[in-house]
Image: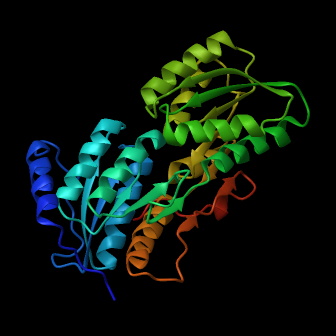
Amino acid sequence: MIRTSRRRPAAAVSLLGAAALMLSGCGTEDDASGAADGAVTLGFVNGAATHFHTCLLKSVEQTAKAEDAKLYSANSKQDAGTELSNIEDMISRNVDALIVQTVNVDALEGDIAKAKSAGIPVFLTSVATGDMSDVLGVAKVDLKQVGALDAGWIAKDAAGKDVKVGIVAGAPGAASDLLVGGFKDALPGTAKVVANQPGMFNPAKAQDVAENMIQAHPDLDYAFVANEEMAFAVRKAFDAAGAKDVKIVSVNGTEDGVAAVKSGALSATVANSAMTIGQTAVKNTIALLNKDKTVDKIANIPLVLVTKDNVDEAPQYCPK
């Protein structure tokens, strides 16, 4: 049986109303609703506006509509303070559960505590907390394993030779730190990381980083880039500098990323489908709200290392 919205104590409602007034300038990114009279109301707090986040939102919206759930959404724009404000705004809307793509794992403790005090369970996407006792569930991408898969490809390709590696990370915190940590830990001893700079998940910034990197290390052999949007800019910078032989490995498995692997612009990427994450998050949130014992609290999203050898097997990344 679908769980319906709860009534909160009067004091809590009063506090939430005050919070709503203070946060009235904090609009949602879409304020989309799956159904006007949906049996369950969900809030989705997205972390940024990269291609991944856009596809994740689309998947959450489509799945919520298919599941007859009303959906509110907001974007935190890579800012932990905005994330907390968005969560407070969702609380004021009296949602039945919150789905959160966090911008920073360190910020989650306060976010979860705020929702818990209002009686609203939180379902996480992409990353899990160390203590899952106060979390409804998670659609988890093993980001350390993502990085490790790319490092494994480099190890195989380098075949025991001494090589130099550059890293173009994302924004400090959450996904980027886990990705880079997993990558560095899995590199062979013959691979030396000579540069590690944040591209902030911004292609223009990543291009600047790559230009500086290749000037400082013209003998670079490989680069690990924390998402494909940045990787395309890094490829452009390397090619312009005459470093077309530098092999780039990346993350996401977007349609453009898979095409770049096919063309040779990228040597490998790890597919972690945004569509699958969104579908899993919405379906599992509703199931766990309804105490469905057949649904696991932690759902691991399948990962696929995409190379020229299996490029046609890459999973669909973004909903149509």
Position of 62 with respect to 161 (left or right) is left
Look at the picture and state if 162 lies above or below 67: above
Quarter of the image with the N terminus in it: bottom left
Percent position of residue 306, x then y: 67, 53
Residue 156 occupies which quadrant of the picture? top right
Report the coloring of the rendering: rainbow
Farthest residue in the right direction? Answer: 160
Percent position of residue 131, x then y: 53, 54
Given residues 279 and 178, the one toward you in this image is 178
Residue 73 showing in the rendered view: yes
Farthest residue in the bottom direction? Answer: 1
Q: Residue at x 55, y 58 (%)?
A: 140
Look at the picture and state if 152 lies above or below 133: above
Position of 106 with respect to 146 (left or right) is left
Position of 171 with respect to 5 (left or right) is right
Given residues 176 and 88, the one toward you in this image is 88
Residue 227 showing in the rendered view: no
Q: Residue at x 45, y 73 (%)?
A: 284
Q: Residue at x 65, y 48 (%)?
A: 146
Percent position of residue 132, x then y: 51, 58
Farthest residue in the top direction? Answer: 216
Q: Residue at x 44, y 58 (%)?
A: 124
